[in-house]
Image (tube, helix red, strand yellow):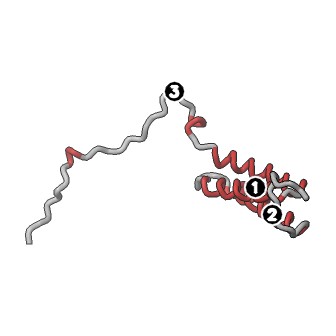
Amino acid sequence: MSAQVDPRRKEKVNRYKAPQNQGQSGASSEDLMPDYMNILGMIFSMCGLMMKLKWCAWFALYCSCISFASSRVSDDAKQVLSSFMLSVSAVVMSYLQNPAPMTPPWAPTA
């Protein structure tokens, strides 16, 4: 058996170099959408709890899911989890207080 020869050419290998931020601060390059969705989720869940608005509670759950899905591993898991649990409790409490189906905010009240 003959020895296997590596078909790759060493002179053609280009190492990956991370792009440098040229004059930009590190905060402007990071994605802030998870943080915005987290804050929106908390605001809407408080509105859903205090004002008994079911659509606010559902929107809070939607924002919390987006925040959870978009968060990085390095983000604080406690904050994301507390926002998610707050929005779930807003949905549960709004239906415990009034089990009637949700009516959209634009629908005329009878």
Q: What percent of the width, then of the height, locates residue 37? A: 69, 49
Q: Quadrant of the N terminus?
A: bottom left
Q: Which marked residue is nearer to the observer: mark 1 or mark 3?
A: 1
Q: Residues within 10 Å of mark 2 (few under 14, many from 20)?
A: many
Relative to 37, is 82 above or below? Answer: below
| Front-most of residues 45 and 1 | 45
Location of mark 3 (residue): 23
- Alpha-carbon distance for marks 1 and 3? 37 Å
Residue drawn at x 32%, y 45% as measured from the top left: 15
SS state under label 3: loop
Location of mark 1 (residue): 60
Residue drawn at x 61%, y 57% as measured from the top left: 69
Q: What percent of the width, then of the height, locates residue 100? A: 86, 68
User: In the current view of this chain or complex, which residue is farthest to the bottom?
Assistant: 1
> Looking at the image, do the residues carrying marks 2 and 1 touch, with CB atoms under 8 Å apart?
yes
Q: Quadrant of the C terminus?
A: bottom right
Name which residue type carries label 1: Ala
| Front-most of residues 98 and 73 | 98
| Front-most of residues 42 and 10 | 42
Residue drawn at x 57%, y 32% as measured from the top left: 25
Name which residue type carries label 3: Gly
